[in-house]
Image (cartoon, grey):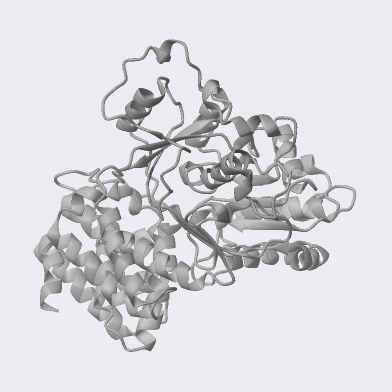
Amino acid sequence: MTRRNDESYTSIPSTSPTSTMASTRTVHALAPSYRKLYEHSTPSIVHLGVGNFFRSHLNFFTHCVLKEEEENTNAVDSKKSKRNWMIHGIGSTNFQEEHQLHQSLQDQSYLYSVLSLPSGQLDVVGSLSSLGHTRTSVSDFESALKAMSSTNTEIISMTVTEKGYHQDSSTGALNYRSPDIIHDMNQLSQTNVRDASSLYPIKTTVGLLVASLGLRKHLDVGGGKPITLLCCDNLPHNGDVLKSLVMEMSESLDPSLAKWIENSVAFPNSMVDRITPAADEKTYRRIKDALGIDCLAPVQAEDFYQWVVEDNFAGERPNWDIVNGVTFVDDVTKYENMKLRLLNGSHTALSYISSLTYQDQDMNVTVDKVMLDEDIVQFVSKYMNDVRPTLNGGPEGEAHLDEYCDSLLQRFSNKDISDQVSRLCQDGSKKFQGFVVPPLKEMLVNGQDVSMIQKVIASWYVYLSGEWKGNIDDPAGEELIQLAKRNELKQFVNVGIGDFVSDTFIIEIENEVNVLRKHGPREFLRSINVL
């Protein structure tokens, strides 16, 4: 889904402009005019996790709505409200990168640019109104909880990545082995939830949500007003998962709070899609050429974007559905399965074997580069074809699935979006559970060929066992890394995939591991030709 060709963006020129804007122009001169309408009111959306994806997706769509409503009021349906739908962002990690991004955005009055590629479309986004943080000080923490529990806040949205929910991959429940979950449970059980300062610090997303909902429940704080918690992370049934985790923690702490949440909080499911790698030096230069100034916090993303949302909100929401590529439906399951199993699953499928294949040439090889390799293209294509029957025609039929699979190969090959393969390898323990295990279970029940999934598991196992020479980034998968290094394949599969697979299934993975180790990644890739 690509934006219409209208005047809501600047097209980057093919050659550098010769103007002298750089010496006189500030980023504030580029602020969308709708910001003036809301400068004296409070945002109605609070967002947890202000990273690149949020800025290219949810916040970008909000920008498009605010801009179109201001410029073309005739396009707005009867649902239009005077509410301030700008977004207050909240950080909740101690990561240096997050603090640096917050500082850059503050220096630009929370404005930033989005460069869409390969079209070269450029937007200056102004829908982020302010930023806060929960880990910098007690007062900042209190301010964050105040915003989250305010009666003015209609929606708390989040992009905190799959690992940000502290979910036990084997049970789907809260991971009570996590030190941060243990800390938050202890903190919330021993302090007065109405005294925000006594709760500091809360370290997890679920803990923050439970604390804010506890405050909101009290009539003299949040008025007990219903609210929507909108998860925008790549989790299957993400709204249902979020609800389950929030309910689990709240029930153990305060059953009356859990009952209030059940009756007053909506958790819509959503499917999110836009490839958004980190901006590189080329992006900074292209944006400077177009705007005549330096943007301290640019975003680069592919032209394609899609957001399918369950129309299940507790109160008001922005008119996001006027944006081309945003769809509200009664059930997102078919859209979600299509995207998670084909796009995210294929990214997972190609990541480990591509890293092993190219590590001697380029440890930082990009997805578009490996997609020039016919062996990898064939590997990914066969993975898609084998998983595809679990979609039962997808949301719009087999012809649409044909187009979607073809479009994924084109998107992966987009040389302007140079996403590093090593980034796709991060957090494999979460990605296999979210993207690979669900179709695997269905394929086993239906008696389908699962050899491609076995190959993908084998490449992950070998990657973790020490044959990848670079760093491994999977904090939640430390047990798996140690099992792989000790050559304990059966236990590795039981922990990383699940104990539902047979001994024969594991033996077949072992055969694939032996092929990969004996003949190398290139012959391993080509072995699919003889299956």
Q: Is residue 171 above or below residue 1?
A: below
Q: Nearer the viewer, residue 127 or 498?
A: 127
* Residue 198 in view here: yes
On the image, the x and y values in percent for residue 18 come to: 31, 15
Q: Quadrant of the C terminus?
A: bottom left
On the image, the x and y values in percent for residue 182 come to: 64, 56
Q: Nearer the viewer, residue 193 or 438?
A: 438
The answer to which quarter of the image holds residue 452 is bottom left
Q: Nearer the viewer, residue 48 or 64?
A: 64
* Left or right placement of residue 175 versus residue 421 in this view: right
Q: Is residue 118 above or below residue 227?
A: above
* Residue 485 in view here: no
Q: Quadrant of the N terminus?
A: bottom left
* Left or right placement of residue 409 versus residue 237 in this view: left
Please give the name of the residue rendered at 42% of the width and 20% of the height, measured from the top-left corner.
293
Q: In this view, does 40 lie above or below 2?
A: above
Farthest residue, direction right? 220
Please give the name of the residue rendered at 35% of the width and 82% of the height, measured from the top-left corner.
443
On the image, the x and y values in percent for residue 22 come to: 41, 15
* Left or right placement of residue 307 versus residue 399 in this view: right
Farthest residue, direction front? 74
Please give the name of the residue rendered at 17% of the width and 50% of the height, measured from the top-left corner.
358
On the image, the x and y values in percent for residue 125 come to: 52, 35
* Left or right placement of residue 439 versus residue 99 in this view: left
The answer to which quarter of the image holds residue 528 is bottom left
Tell how many labels: 0
The answer to which quarter of the image holds residue 210 is bottom right
